[in-house]
Amino acid sequence: MERVPSRRRRLLSWLPSILLVTLMAVAGFVTVAINNSWWVDPNPVAGADQTAPGGSSIFTGAGVDYLSRTGLVVIRMDSGAALPAEQLGLEPDGERSIASERPLRVQVFGPDGALVVQDARQVTLSTEAGELIRVDVVVPVGGNFTSAHAQLTQVADLYGWSAEELETMLDEIGAAKRDDPDSPATASVGPGGEVGLAVTATLLADRGAEITYTAERLP
């Protein structure tokens, strides 16, 4: 057996300690970096590239990072505060969809109020001739389509939907599911104009339920 020199043995005996100290230093650096990160700040302050003047969300990479972090999407479609598509980070003509793993609170402001949607998972923005003309907000609903319908009933007066429209919606989906329980069924209510926008809700009944709220500029 080859004999290891004593000096080498001493060096080898120090290696575990050196490695441990190095790993602790790296872990400490990573912890400090994370703790100082904007992503873990409980009250992040938006930079100029993350929100638009007037508090509107913008849909550039930095803007989407910010709204994903805060869970709040603010969209201004009231004439005094509406911004051109370019300033919102959108193409002049087209659609942009933003999906989120985190539930979002979406506020779409019109001249006379706002469409406010909780627990949204997708927002689609449609532009035409350089202006934002339509917003679609998708919300998964726990339970079946009657649970979703009950949610719409609670906000009907806010958006201008009548009791008759809501009853017709329920009848249409119920009849469709009775005829073919395994196929998806949809029905819509609206548009109502209480907030100064044309607000519609479309209920999808499939294995679960989903509501798509739509806000469009009035003619």
Image (spheres, rainbow, N blue to C red):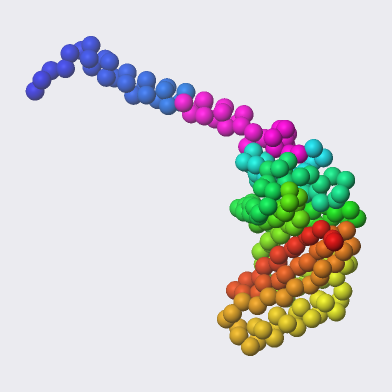
Q: Residue 219 in the image: state x and y as whole percent.
A: 85, 61
| Horizontal side of residue 207 vs 125, given as left or right | left
Residue at position x 85%, y 79% in the image: 164
Residue in front for this viewpoint, 2 or 92: 92
Residue 178 among those drawn in magenta:
no
Q: Residue 8 in the image: state x and y as whole percent.
A: 22, 15
Residue 82 in sight here: yes
List the single residue furthest toward the bottom. Answer: 179
Residue in front for this viewpoint, 60 or 118: 60
Measured along the vertical axis of the image, is residue 12 above or below residue 167?
Answer: above
Q: Would you identify the image quadrant in which residue 50 lies?
A: top right
Q: Would you identify the image quadrant in which residue 198 lies?
A: bottom right
Residue 33 among those drawn in magenta:
yes
Measured along the vertical axis of the image, is residue 12 above or below residue 90?
Answer: above
Residue 106 in sight here: no
Residue at position x 56%, y 28% in the image: 33
Q: Residue 48 in the image: state x and y as whole percent.
A: 72, 32
Residue at position x 79%, y 44% in the image: 83
Report the quarter where the N terminus lies: top left
Residue at position x 61%, y 32% in the image: 37
Extent of the magenta region = 26-52
